[in-house]
Every structure is written in structure tokens, then in C-alpha cells.
Amino acid sequence: MAELNTLSAVEIVAQIRKGIVTPSEVMAACLNRIKTREPEIGAFIHLEADRAMERAKALDDLPPKGALFGVPFAVKDIIDTDDMPTRWGSPIYENRKPERNASCVEAFIAAGAIPIGKTVTTEFAYFQPGKTANPHNTGHTPGGSSSGSAAAVADHMVPLAFGSQTAASLIRPAAYCGISAFRPTTGGFNLQGVMGLSHSLDTLGVLARTVPDLSLCREVLMGDLATSLPEIDEDSLPCVGLMRGPNWWDGSIEMRNVCTTAMGAITATGANTGDVSTPPSFTNLTQAQITVMAYETARTRICEYSAQQDQLSPQFAALIEDGRNVSDTEYQRALSQRERSYAMLEAVMGDCDVLLAPSAPGEAPAGLGATGDPLYSRMWNLLQVPTVALPFLTGPNGLPTGIQLIAKRGHDAKLLAVAEWLQNIFQSQNKRKLT
């Protein structure tokens, strides 16, 4: 049997229900992995090992109940927990201790999952990185801002972790760490208890090693609102379009190769595939996202800037200053551009179920002083569409590469169904190395 810490959440729940393993045995395996690897990876800013084991042992004596019964999970340190600090990646909030759980944490606990600790985030989930290293090569960034969550899942410390995305903070670290991530349609998951940065862009998401785990998390977080995933078989293959996007030539050659290789694998199944044109106006969407994010952040985090600017990084202070210089007219123009461009996106997609696009410029960059370029998610985040990151192949330096899937707003169930179908197709090719 595989090491318990390497099991997916779906597998853990199934084995617990069959009486093959107990929650405390699963927890012990995860904690042992953390003890062994945390000094090198630095995924956690706060760990509650004893409390997590107490909770797991308490579940040992109960009949399995709940969709996530006995599953350990980690929480990004911008998400409130009532028994652990939530510091938002800033020294300003070093001693901040919330009195209640965020809604997402409470939903997981109600479903039988066990919080194990708080993971490292960049400062205010923006730019300034923390201590976390990429598990595949500790000389490289894990991406950000959900740095610790991505690293903890990728290194088999936990099967699930919460993250968030305002620009590229789920998709990019998932790509760099070789795991999957799900960003729902904006507003799809409740944000009570999640630190705010940019209200029209902020989105709660989850990171896991398998797409079925992402789907399970969606069911728990949405409850009765979660529509069932449609079935995909030989008689109902999806339509997948490649959208190179306005920044296709700004990334690495391996980024382009992984996208075209993935499309070749999909075409070989008999699915309907082809290129989808990029509307010329999409070249302005990255700047529009930057404008919206700066404007809204400057107003959300004005208190820290006004009273405690000396404790902000120069990069975060500059973001607020940039946002203060954005006029209401410029902001409204960017929002209008979003809606016009989304209408164009629906038109060019036509009957496509999903689009396939780059998830990152390439492999994770060397060094821990930055988290990589968010270029390939800014546009999609601005358009408020659901996205999934899928690992696929490795680059010339042996680090993970991957692709991003995009669906129309509200088509989250279809997106996850196609993502699961593709993950099964990709598994047979994922040992290949791009050259």
C-alpha cells in the first residue's frame, strides 16, 4: 500500500470508510512527512501538530461521517482560524488571533476534515515572498502568493490546502510545483474570513494533487449549490480550443511546447480541437487587471499604508501609491473593458467547452527573492472565469510544467469534468521531459 501521506483526499476517505486505515494513522503519516521535510521546504508559518493529532484520534472512535472525514488540510495564512494566528504575511499582524473560523475552514471541519497548520503567504498575498522553497528544487521559487499551500501539497505533507488568487496566486504556484489548482468563477466560494485585497478580483481556491480532490472540495464548499459534474465518455468527448493569447511569445519555448504537446494528446483521443483566435483588444487586459487591482487594493489596505507604512515592503507601498494615482474614470474604463472583453470571449469560444492556455511562463525561476511572473493568469482573473491548473511534463531543468484550462463564467462543473478527463490522458505522458 502507498504511504498514507501520498494518498489523495478521495482515497483517504474511502480507506477510512472501509476500515483499512484510521484518521490518526493518516495524520501521523502527514506529520512525519512535515517533520522530515519542513526544515528544507518551509511551507508552514504555524503548525498545530498536537492539536491535529488530538482531533484525528477523536475521529478514530466515531463512525465515518462527512465528505472529508479524516482528511488533513492546510490553510493559507490570510484565512482566519479560531485556534491559530492569521498574520496575512505581514509583521503588522504578527499577533493577530481571529475569534472565528473563515467559512471555508468551518465547512471543511463540518465535513470531517482536520486543519493541520497555516501555510506561508507573500505579504498581503501580493509580492514580497516568504521562506518557502520549491519541493522539486529548493533553489527555485514555489510561486506565490499561495506559496506554502502549493509546496505542502506537492511535497505530500497534506492532500489539500486552501489558497487564493487575485492575479495568479493559485494557478502559478500549482504550475511551478506540479500540482492541480481550482479557481472558481468569481464569487463561487464564500470569502467570509479571507483577507481582502481587491474585491472584484479576490477568489478563494483549493490546491490538490488530483482533480477529483478539487471537485470534492467544491462540493463541500458549495453544498446544495454544487451542480454535478457531467460525464465524459467516448460518445461525449469535449471540445477543447487552444488560445495562445496576447503574450504567447513572451514566455519560454517549453511553455509553448507543453501547450502544443497537450493539444496533440487531446486531438489523438478524437476530441474536437482547434485554435481559438485572440481578440485584438485582449492585449489590453493585463494592464486593465493591474489598474483594477491597484485601485481596489489602495482603498482596501489604506489603514496599513496611512498608519504603519514603515512596516510595509517597498513593493506593497508602491502598489498602494499606484492605486491612489488611478482615477475613478480609469478604474471604470477598466471595468467596462472587462465586460466588453468577456462578451468577446464567449463569442470566440463558440461551442468550445474549455480553452487551453499557458499557466506560467515556464519552469519555476531560480531564487527565492521573487515568485515569478503572473502574466499568464492576470487576464483570466480579470475576466472572472473559472480556471484549473494541470501539471503536464517537465521542462529542460527537470522542474514541472503545465497548462491552464478556462471555461465560461458559471461553467465550473464542466471545467472540472474536462480537467479530470484530461488528467487521466496526461498521466501516461507525464514522465516525458521537454527539450
Image: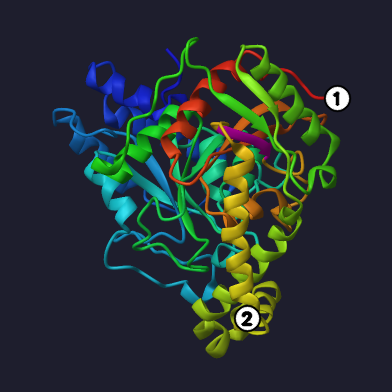
**Placement of the C terminus among the 4 image quadrants:** top right
Question: Magenta includes 356?
Answer: yes
> Which is nearer the N-term, disc 1 or disc 2?
2
Quarter residue 116 falls in: top left
Task: Name the side, left or right, on which 182 lies relative to 81.
Answer: right
Secondary structure at badge 1 equals loop
Residue at x 71%, y 43% (from the top left corner)? 360
The amino acid beneath tag 1 is: Thr
Q: How many marks?
A: 2
Q: Which residues are magenta?
A: 354-358
Residue indicated by mark 2? 329
Quarter residue 191 falls in: bottom left
Quarter residue 423 falls in: top right
Secondary structure at badge 2 equals helix
Q: Is residue 102 visible?
A: yes
Residue at x 55%, y 43% (from the top left corner)? 150
Residue at x 52%, y 28% (from the top left corner)? 419
Task: Name the side, left or right, on which 223 lies relative to 252.
Answer: left
Residue indicated by mark 1? 435
**Placement of the N terminus among the 4 image quadrants:** top left
Vertical placement of 236 versus 241: above or below? above
